[in-house]
Amino acid sequence: MNHEAIKQAIAAGETSLGIEFGSTRIKAVLIDRQFTAIASGSYDWENRLKDGFWMYEQEDIITGMQTAYRELKQEVEQTYGVKLQTVGAIGFSGMMHGYMAFDSAGELLVPFRTWRNSTTGEAAHALTELFQFNIPERWSIAHLYQAILNKEAHVSRIDSITTLAGYIHRELTGERAIGIGEASGMFPIDDATHDYHPSMVQQFNDLVADRGYPWKLSSVLPKIYLAGEQAGQLTEAGAQLLDPAGDLQPGIPFCPPEGDAGTGMVATNSVKKRTGNISVGTSVFAMIVLDKELSRVYPEIDMVTTPDGSPVAMAHANNCSSDINAWVGLFREFAEAMGFEVDSAKLFSVLFNKALEADPDGGGLLSYGYYSGENITGLEQGRPLFVRSPESRFNLANFMRTHLFSAFGALKIGMDILTEQEQVVIDSVLAHGGLFKTPVVGQRIVAAALNVPVSVMSTAGEGGAWGMALLASYMDNKGAEESLADFLEQQVFANVEGETIAPETADVQGFETFIERYRKGLAIEQAAVEHLIKNNN
């Protein structure tokens, strides 16, 4: 669309808005009917460890949302000369999992507990045994039951629980709604009914019946919606909250709020069976849409769904890019101390490309970028760790390759369960996230880890906010019988280009050697957790 056509589309509300609350950035994206991002805004934030929990302040949630929207609105006005007053549809997404509990007045009872917490091991194990269904530590129900086991005073006052995306959706629409993909990170889903699994709901109610709480589980969980369904509309209060300037008009329809896993699937066109995607950021997860059930329960594998309800096997590692970013920051400090001005993109590019010059296995080096605990490898806490022996080949290339390998170490262990033990067939894997901004390197590393071709589309940099905007557009513009998969395949991605890199034998063999060293070295990481005391000041 040309400039004038976009201006007219904005004025007519022929757009879709997606806002995603990521772990380090809140991003807002406005797209047109051709699914092109025409404006964006963002807000940087970080979680913090407070009273033993990784959390974000409630004030930061609202401030971040308003800031990201205000930046987008300003870009619209500056670029197109029109004030943003309405859009065709809105959708919110956020970090999956976690725990937000509210009383009957809508007040948050405890600070938002994020996916990063590994404080619910007792509850997760007990519920997995009870349901015979894997309940990861990150899931909302694990947080709720752990609070019950801990006899936390707030539990008796609970009126509702939800996720970050569900919370924002309720604040803007007044609806206790959740997309099915996001819901599947709260409590197990019945594939047949696309609702919370009824027998497991009853098992949970029976489990806590003697506690005397005034609520039942079904009454505190949000209502589930499928992609394409309308899940409310912007209220007057919601419009004022999102746009305090008062320009945004109420009445805009909302699609179901989703998690970043769901928006990642949408943004990479990975909602069809036997397709997969890998999302790389502070955490890393790979999701494979299944064409058959797994033979048994695996504590390393989450069973979730696509935004339209298809079963998905998910391997999720809590730690990925944080330690790499810290080391790159150290190299930046050195360069600046030497008097050099450093461009961030060039710094990452130079260091990442050095990894391609390394020994296939990383030269005998070992690292764990564990800023927090890691469920797949059984660590309740984390300590970033770099280890080498006197015989290791310690040079910059091997150093960088090792850290890139390590970023996918825990994920590799989870994915091996699917590909080796369950013989899950994966036709294609699409990757997205900041690590792939440097061409080739990230794809080669992931292709080596998973031993499958890895593709990155030209739209990969758009991210989850764009994926959420696509879900909003799907609700607003889909055909009468048009599935989400068809909408993405035939409309959104029909002419999108991408680059595919197949695994190289030397890389695959090198990663296998590395992952054997990684598994054996977990005892070192456990010792660091036990003996290297955290300083929380």
Image: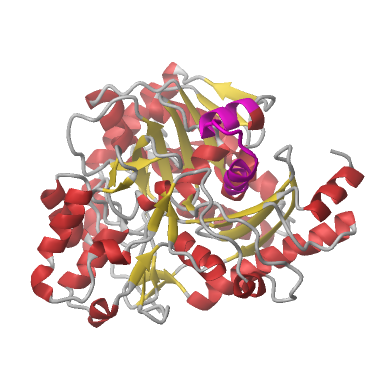
Residue 449 lies, in percent from the top left, at 40, 30
- Indicate the quadrant where residue 102 lies: bottom left
Quadrant housing residue 252: bottom right
Relative depth, front residue between 181 and 349: 181
Relative to 480, is 216 above or below? below
Answer left or right for 283 relative to 313.
right
* Range covered by the magenta-colored residues: 468-490
- Residue at the top extreme of this rendering: 505
Residue appearing at x 67%, y 25% in the figure:
497
Which of the colour schemes (rainbow, by chain, secondary structure, one colour) is used? secondary structure
- For the stretch drawn in magenta, the main secondary structure is helix
Give the farthest residue toward the front.
Answer: 480
Residue 359 visible in the snapshot: no
- Residue drawn 16% across and 59% down? 204
- Residue nearest the observer in this picture, 138 or 255: 255
Which quarter of the rendered picture does the N terminus lie within?
A: top right
Question: Is residue 20 in view from this perspective?
Answer: yes
| Left or right: 268, with 11 as reference point | left
Q: Which quarter of the figure is the C terminus placed in?
A: bottom left
Specify whether 12 is left or right of 328: right
Instruction: Let me know if residue 140 is in the magenta part.
Output: no
Q: Position of residue 9 (x, y in %)?
A: 81, 48
Q: Residue at x 56, y 68 (%)?
A: 172
Where does residue 499 sit, x and y in percent of width and height?
Answer: 62, 24
Residue 182: x and y, percent?
Answer: 41, 51
Q: Residue at x 44, y 24 (%)?
A: 507
